[in-house]
Image: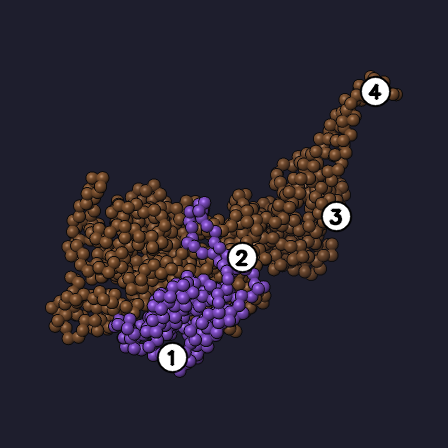
Chain colours: A brown, B purple
Amino acid sequence: MPRGPRKTARRAPSRGRSRPAAGHSPARRRWLAPGFKVFVALAVAFGAYLVYLDARIRAQFEGKRWALPAHVYARPLELYAGMTLRPEELESELLALGYRQRGQPAVPGDFSRRGDGFRVYTREFRFWDGTEPPHRFQASFADGRLARLENGSDRPVRIEPLRIGGIYPGHHEDRVLVQIDDVPPLLVAALLATEDRDFYRHHGVSPRAIGRALLANLRAASVVQGGSTLTQQLVKNYFLSNERSLWRKAQEALMAVLLELHYSKAEILEAYLNEIYLGQDGPRAIHGFGLASHFYFARALDELRPSQIALLVALVRGASHYNPRRYPERARERRDRVLDTLVAQGRLDPDAGFKAKQEGLGVTPRPPGGSTRYPAFMELVRRQLQRDYRDEDLTSEGLRIFTTLNPRVQGRAERALSQRATRLEKIKGLPPDSLEGAVLVTTREGGEVLALVGGRQARFAGFNRALDAVRPVGSLIKPAVYLTALTSGEYTLATSLQDTTLRVRGPDGKVWAPQNHDHRTHGNVPLYLALAESYNLATARLGFSVGLRQVLNTLRKLGVERTVPAYPAVFLGAVNLSPFDVTQMYQTLAAGGFRTPLRAIREVSRADGEPLARYPLTVEQVVPPAEAYLITTALQQVIARGTGSALARRLPSGLTPAGKTGTTDDLRDSWFAGYTGDYLAVAWLGRDDNQPAGLSGAAGAMQVWGDIMEGLGPRPLRPVPPPDVAYAWVDSTGRLSGEGCEGATALPFREGTLPVERSECAGSSRADPVEKVVNWFKDLLR
Amino acid sequence: MTPALRLFWAGLALTVQISGCATQRGDQVPVEERGGPLATQAPGPSSSRAEPTAPRPRPQPSPVPPPPGPGTRPAATGPGPLAPSPASRSAPATPPPGRASAARRADPAVVALLKSARDQAASGDLTGAAASLERALRIDPQDPWTWYRLAVVRFQQGQLGQAEQFARKADTLAGTDTDVRARSWRLISLVREREGDPAGAQAARDKAQALSL
């Protein structure tokens, strides 16, 4: 194309020289020359302009053709008989996936429900490890469990995962790319019939169409019809301007002609199908029929009925004017016009056309989660991906990212945080919306992040407190002190600690004099009880005995990567960590002393489904099994009898979770970290302005934790005692005792650390104190 | 012996067989496995990208200890030298956690996934086998046998460090199941041999030996 302008340019200088020529009077030449010069200059400018336009339109076309944001998916729901799941939860998962409820499932994407019985016809989905073909299954529920599952195999039924968002370049455009061969023919027919009847005949602009439009507009004395070809509309979309000037139109027409010179009709049509603007979802523009199909109907383009196809085509004329969620009447009228046109042109038989017009719009009441419902979790995914991928790849390669998010757990966590925070504000007389919080929920053994809530307004991206609120953790740090003591070999759970006044002068001359929360001292207390009751004085004394460096070392082993200052106040939690950091630390305790890096991503595959990378489960043993077992037992005591006992009263009695409360100076931060048989959850409550929230760990964050677990129906925590651990009855001073003796408690001991001193009661007890514990232990397991 | 248990023995035998003759198919797509803790801060200059694991040299055919025949299963009732816990000696009326986890193996979904893992490993798709085992762990994360199988797969992939760690995990979850404990320690001895740590290998072998008595 740029040949023309260059020719003009070459001729221009020769004409520019004032060379006398015969037959022309100087006067006339003088008059002609400037005119000609102007003409030539204009021609040059126009040529250059064409070159510019050409480059611009081609860059757009090529660039947009392949720009695909990464698609991010939640975990797929895997169904198996006996799993904890309520019928409502299966139903809401299916509805979120856009499954249609009907009397009898007929096609993939259908399901029926009668009471607690389901019949489901799943859709095909290409997972990272292969394609899950469409298949039918039946399920029934009883007592909060999936009681029966019939799918012709024992393998779990893996349902397609929910798409939870995309990773877009800065301007928030989303795409679900379609290929011209996969587009329903009726859609192309409808598009050409209503928008550009001469598409296959024109060269980018259609004088006939313009003439027709002009005539119609003159008749109506206003603009009622546009003469733009699809190519012109495509160009217009590329530069998204509402300007309707003649100059703009001319520019678009030129670009349309240029585009047609470079690309085939099929290529242009495909680009159009993927580019045209069809709606708006907050800041996210809905471009292309593939995405619009999901946006309006929550289904794939090739699953649409004729009436739905006609509605999408209707939107081409004005996605906001005909917005079917906002102006259903207008949209319907316009859709029926499209259907009429199709029938009139013989593209749809009259019966089908009539039927289609009887149908409702079929639009979902709300747009499905596309621009993400889970901005805080997405932020975590993005941060991990950025370690391994370039920004351009994430926003243009259409990668498919399979994450660990469990929408059911996430929903519980979000509700628990926002509802509990509202209640606590009222109780404590705090200004509304001043209390903030964060929650993380992971799998206890696998470290998969099931839920991440970055604040009370979970739908809005903003300050992500789960990742970025780095706050003092208070007593949450204490298990590290006690674990250090237990692994040193010098201490057992029964060792007597001194909870007495402590004054320490630091190297800077300042005196550190910690206090207990109740401002009292408790004398001699067994080690496990000092942790359960979170006594500061006993803990600080223990910290000094085992050594600051050893405690810091334990913290690092547990997975705390942030720098921790080396001063004694660390023993009582003068350490700033984010909820995410705390979760990583407790993950190691919850997983029996195996550090398990938190993961938000399972797999990444290419747009075509080809697997690209896996983020596998990895573990590293950093605490010996016996000590890991002892610390978990002690943390179970926190809830059984210590600062978390309010939790034991509200949860099922056999659950025996392990956990720790955390409270900071002046009640600014309220923390709770705890785990059950299957989940680890960490909750934080506090104020963004760091003013006191008036909440202890037990009064605030622990309530949120309890709300979450109540909703999830977790499995009981029953850690396996390692072979080198034995139980024994001990009294409050740490001597061997016997069952039924005053103040006797059964505690686990690592081999070789059993107390040797016996209480008087132990002597009188008939059986060996070690043997006697068996019955007690059996009770614990029940 | 319950059918589930029989199936599991058959599976184990196959797993071990595979470990001796596993080959990485040439036509397989190299899939990267990325590790490391999940960073929540923006990556710094030192942030290292995960290495692809697929092109790693295949480990030599390994002599993973053959399973005993169904009749020769070592008795798991008597406490080993390392198991003086009263819990492990408690009456069978209330099974201790170790036993409980063995009983949970009957979960058909887990069995089906273990079978998939075995088939994938048999066809050389070790990455897929690991993924199936992880799916099984999501259903029953406390099953020491699943962890042990994951250890075997990692060993076959030449990921010795993870092989040992998963074997240790199996060991700690095993409770009184001395069989899986003995196997785990035998696998650890192989790992250490390959890592050039004969003393460590011997210690692990001794431990396995003591557990098999």
Look at the numbered disc 1 and give the secondary structure of its residue: loop
What x and y, as percent, mark residue A99?
A: 54, 61
> Marks 4 and 2, how far apart in space?
73 Å
Callouts 1 and 3 in the same chain: no
Residue A551 seen in the figure = yes
Q: Which mark is residue A20?
A: 4
The residue marked by circle 3 belongs to what chain? A
In space, the residues marked 1 and 2 are separated at their CA atoms by: 42 Å
- Labels 3 & 4 near each other (Cβ < 8 A): no
Q: Which of marks 1 and 3 is in front?
A: 1
Q: Which chain carries label 4?
A: A
- Tell me if A361 is positioned left or right of A493 in this view: right
Residue B73: mark:
1
Q: What element carries label 4?
A: loop
The residue that mark 3 highlights is A198
Q: Give whichever of A633, A366 is nearer the camera.
A: A633
